[in-house]
Image: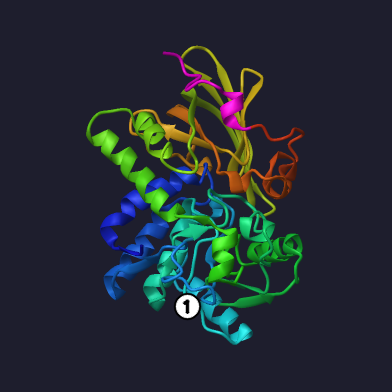
Amino acid sequence: MSWILDETLLPDLARGAALLGTGGGGDPYIGRLLVQQAIRENGPITVLDPQAESELPDEAFVVPTAMMGAPTVMVEKIPRGTEAVVALRRLEAHLGRRAEATMPIECGGINSMMPLLVGARTGLPVVDADGMGRAFPELQMETFSVYGVSGSPMVVASDREETVLIDTGADDVRMERCSRAIAIQFGGAALIAEYSMTGADVRRTAIPHTMSMSLGAGRAIREARESHSDPVDALTEFFATTVYENVRTLFTGKVGDVERRTTGGFARGHADLRGHDGSHLRLSFQNEHLVAVLDGEVVCVVPDLICVLDEQTGEPITTEGMRWGQRVVVVAISTPPIMRTPEALAVFGPRAFGVDRDFTPVEQLVPGPSLAPA
């Protein structure tokens, strides 16, 4: 069933999206402020149930919208708020067809907010689904692409409302490389419209209800904090009711050294953390956390989610927001079956990021409920 998103829901939605961003995806705070302003000016947003054909007919035309670039750039290079609509309208003009809805390409980070901004500014409904179920650094890393929807033609728009149309046919890797080069020329971040598809394609290729899940996860953290209970326990209980199912506590301790650099349009690096029990955790990231190694043993690997939370508040911490001395808890969340098929792992499994190992589900790497000291 469809539902109405107003500005009162945005803080919980942004918090849950930051969690599902697995450290990347861009901090949704700025996006939340942009959406809040747009809702105040234009009214609330209708969110469609992707599994209800009465709401999203098979022939409906859906154009996802998003931001691309390095999260470290987005901290300083704030969008003006019109670029995504410009990208959408340019793509519509090229295709000769108007969109009937927009949708996230990823539910994590700032890209949970960009389609909402488009929806508020244009009146388009937003589909409660996405193509990553988290955040990934590259545009071909989509369940859309894995299951046969082409990313191009796509449009990249700058903050000066310049646009570039890219059409690489079915080669979504080539599309990513070309658009990344353009985004770098646009200052390291840009807004995009891509992966246009039908309602039937959405049902076949997208991960459903991830926007609702972000909202629920953000609410669980907030309510746990307000009741002085453990946010990780609340998240464990919440995700057990979803297709993500498993939450594991990997580590509790303090952030030590963080090596972070912006190169090739990505934020790359690693963080070393020291546990209260003397353990050592290393996190490696490319925008998002990719691998967690505890005392020399891999305990979680992409595409499962690795999330860093403030130990006291449960607030998610992004890779660009990690600082020496922060006291944190690191949790892992398992991804749904659609993201664990051989076809999917070939696109966004460990080896797609140059990690020399096969994917092992976190519930196998960490069989019990927790690795943290009692």
Q: Is residue 304 visible?
A: yes
Q: Position of residue 314 (x, y in %)?
A: 37, 34
Of residue 147 and residue 317, the one placed in the foreground of this image is: 147
Of residue 64 and residue 296, the one placed in the foreground of this image is: 64
For image coordinates 52% across by 58% down, the residue present is 130
Q: SS class of the residue under badge 1?
A: loop
Q: Quadrant of residue 149?
A: bottom right
Q: Quadrant of the C terminus?
A: top left
Label 1 CA crowd tier, 10 Å (few <14, some 14–19, many 20+): some
- Magenta part of the chain: 361-374
Q: Is residue 287 visible?
A: no
Say if the magenta span includes residue 62: no
Q: Main secondary structure of the magenta part?
A: loop
For image coordinates 59% across by 61% down, the residue present is 204
Side of 44 where 367 appears, left or right: right
Side of 67 where 326 appears, left or right: left
Q: Quadrant of residue 228?
A: top left
Side of 31 where 270 appears, left or right: right
Q: What is the three-letter code of the residue carrying label 1?
A: Glu
For image coordinates 52% across by 42% down, the residue present is 22
Side of 178 where 315 appears, left or right: left
For image coordinates 59% across by 44% down, the residue present is 337
Q: Position of residue 97 (x, y in %)?
A: 56, 85
Q: Position of residue 215 (x, y in %)?
A: 36, 50
- State how the image is colored: rainbow
| Residue designated by label 1 | 100
Q: Quadrant of the N terminus?
A: bottom left
